[in-house]
Image (cartoon, rainbow, N blue to C red):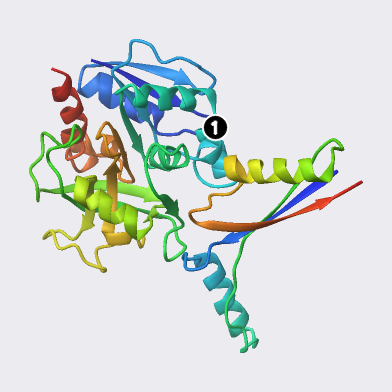
Amino acid sequence: MRFGIAVYPGSNCDYDTYRIITGILKKEAKFLDYRETKIQNIDCMILPGGFSFGDYLRPGTLAAHTPLTQAVVDFAQGGGIVIGICNGFQILTEAHLLPGALLPNIHGRFICKHQYLKVENDNSIFTKKTKKGQILKIPIAHHDGNYFCDEETLESMEKNGQIILRYCDKDGNISKEANPNGSIQNIAGITNKEGNVFGLMPHPERASESILGSVDGLSILESIIENRL
Amino acid sequence: MLIKFFIKPRKGVLDPEGRAVAESLRSLGFENVKDVKVGKYIEVYITDIPKEEAEKQAYQMAKKVLVNELIEEYEIEIVES
């Protein structure tokens, strides 16, 4: 199993992600520069967190139009597994690989904290090693994580099981109080209809070593690996 | 030749920046402020082409990258040199 990690100007979770994949999960990973036009011998592409292109225009927009992201679109359309974390999620929506958009947080502030999440679908490529209803503790760190889509999209995502993670409190209650950013229906992570592209605001790579306070993020990365065995 | 893009949050889409600015204006005594929308203004300078063509190009630029129509609305203005 070989991971590709996208590197845009302003990516800042690329090395964290690399460390977890190679150091903890003992899998191969390769950095791919945003000017690359081809993705070869890669099983899963990771679009890491950060502030690609300084969040200019809208978060993720300029990164979505780079040669590498266009190659990621082809890779995904050919069935390749893609995961976008935080800024990576924003890039995936701007590249139209995932529906909806990520608006500024409802209170206008940057949030950086541990957050409880509820697994809504354990049948996806990205959550096979979790259980439906399981509560994960994974950090969030963003200014624009307020997920938005129209009613029709929301309904079809619900029906297709595309909503993978929702923000909740420590007892698993999905409430307004447990919603850190104003996301529609507490949405924290979604897949595309085909199920091979996943975007989430929380950072699994920041919850993959006990010294970091949680190892719940590993279950997501391990799910991807198990899927390929 | 200049294309001006006036972009703002789409009606019904939350605009925390606009809301914060509205609150600030009200606290400064502008009590009749009903609502504020904070958007973007972009100037794109291009070589001279027929106005119709520039307009067509402007809409393509908006659709492809400058505007996310799910959350934003916009107007354009073409200024001939």
SS for dot 1: loop
Query: In the displayed structure, does residue B19 sit left or right of residue B58?
Result: left
Q: Position of residue B27 (x, y in %)?
A: 59, 84
The quadrant of the picture occupied by the C terminus of chain A is top left
Residue occupying image coordinates x 47% and y 27%: A69
How busy is the neighbourhood of tag 1: few (under 14 within 10 Å), some, or many (20 plus)? some
- Residue bearing the label numbered 1: A65
Chain to which mark 1 belongs: A
Residue occupying image coordinates x 81% and y 38%: B46
Residue type for callout 1: His
Q: Position of residue A228 (x, y in %)?
A: 17, 19
The count of marks equals: 1
- Of residues B40 and A135, the one drawn nearer to the viewer in this rendering: B40
Query: In the displayed structure, does residue B5 sit left or right of residue B80?
Result: left
Task: Give above or below for A210 relative to B67.
Answer: above
Residue occupying image coordinates x 35% and y 35%: A84
Residue occupying image coordinates x 10% and y 39%: A130
Query: In the displayed structure, does residue A143 sit left or right of residue B67?
Result: left
Quadrant assignment, res B26: bottom right
Which residue is at the far right?
Answer: B81
Quadrant assignment, res A179: bottom left
Q: Position of residue A56 (x, y in %)?
A: 59, 44
Task: Give above or below for A94 relative to A70.
Answer: below
Asked whether residue A1 appears in the rendered view, the answer is yes
The quadrant of the picture occupied by the N terminus of chain A is top left
